[in-house]
Image: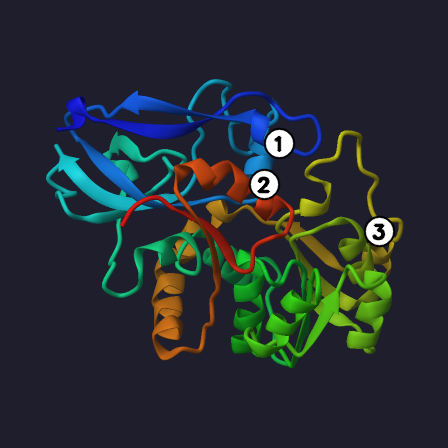
Amino acid sequence: MAGESTGREVRLASRPKGEPTLADFEIAEVPVPEPGEGQVLVRNTWMSVDPYMRGRMDDVESYIPPFKLGEAMTGGAVGEVVASRADSVPVGATVSHFLGWREYAVLDAASATVVDADTAPARAYLGPLGSTGLTAYASLVEVAPVREGDVVFVSAAAGAVGSVAGQIARKLGASRVIGSAGGPRKTAMLLEDFGFDAAIDYKAGPVADQLAKAAPDGIDVYLDNVGGDHLEAALGAARTGGRFALVGAISVYNATEPVPGPSNLFLAVKRELSLRGMLVGSYTHLVPEYTRRASAWLADGSLRTEETVREGIDAAPEAFLGMLRGENIGKMLVHLAD
């Protein structure tokens, strides 16, 4: 079956200078290979696009290898096993894996995680039950732990990580949760759908001024997805002993020149702040605990999630670019097949 059919994949055609464009991608039709011994063939049904992938478009050393020119890109995906030469992963199983950006993927069975599609929709394992949900949880329980009564600030709070993080902060005992997002629709959703106490529209005025009004007595915890003016504002608002989880800096991902750090970084010394970088791969030990808790929250409706979906592999590049421009609410996903 596999050898007689073809599937499409998205390749990196060129390395962008500044903001990527559709010209930096190409879609190729390729034969679907047969799995080898110990491997499975997966028909991908959903794939994820995420901010960290922008860094992989550049040919620079980082915590994850860059994409290679002319080759299929990679990233989170879920799908159905349609052929298997591994007893541990049977045909028909739903699995999550890291060979997204393609319609069919052959991978070692050890690289596929069988997921329970009856407990939650398969796509949830790319969002609230996947790396973005784990990022939010690990950030607030280990990297910048939330304590009872804390005031918590989350940037990019309408995104995949931020929308979950605000709700988890509340579950961990935060007394006030503040989020930033771009535009009135997103800020309204923070208040009405995700349970934030206050919402900052970074497009409507200086973040520092709005944060000072939303948290007149300061903040204890900051989950940073943005960097730039958000990080500077959070430093200015931080109480003594504040904890910062530095998850991302999407405001500078397309920069073509070195970006200066916050002008008020010395406040980290003066107020004895903890600023700690966070890579989700360092927190896999929390997966069983988080999956158990988050599954229960999703089941009882106390964890609200949103998705922005684009249809078909052809839409994957535009979905990625749209996510970088902030067009998504919640997780940006590409639906490949039913």
Q: Could you tell me which secondary element the residue under label 3 belongs to?
A: loop
**Residue farthest toward the top in the current orientation of the protein:** 70
Q: CA distance from mark 3 to mark 2?
A: 31 Å
**Circle 3: residue type:** Leu
Residue at 43%, 60% in the rendered image: 128
Residue at 56%, 60% in the rendered image: 329
Q: CA distance from mark 2 to mark 1?
A: 7 Å
Can residue 177 be seen at all in this image of the molecule? yes
Q: Quadrant of the N terminus?
A: top left
Mark 3 or mark 1, which has the lower sequence index? 1
Residue at 81%, 60% in the rendered image: 233
Nearest to the observer: residue 4 or residue 200: 4
- How are the colours assigned in the image? rainbow
Asked if 87 appears above or below 59 in the picture, the reply is below
Q: CA distance from mark 3 to mark 1?
A: 34 Å
Residue density around tag 2, few if under 14, some if 14–19, many if 20 or more, within 10 Å: some
Residue, disc 2: 321
Q: Could you tell me which secondary element the residue under label 2 belongs to?
A: helix
Residue, disc 3: 265
**Circle 2: residue type:** Leu
On the image, the x and y values in percent for residue 201 come to 74, 65
| Residue 274 placement, left or right of 37 | right
Which mark, residue 295?
none
What is the quadrant of residue 4 in the picture? top left
Nearest to the observer: residue 92 or residue 107: 92
Tag 2 near tag 1, CB within 8 Å: yes
**Circle 1: residue type:** Thr
Asked if 94 appears above or below 198 in the picture, the reply is above
Residue, disc 1: 21
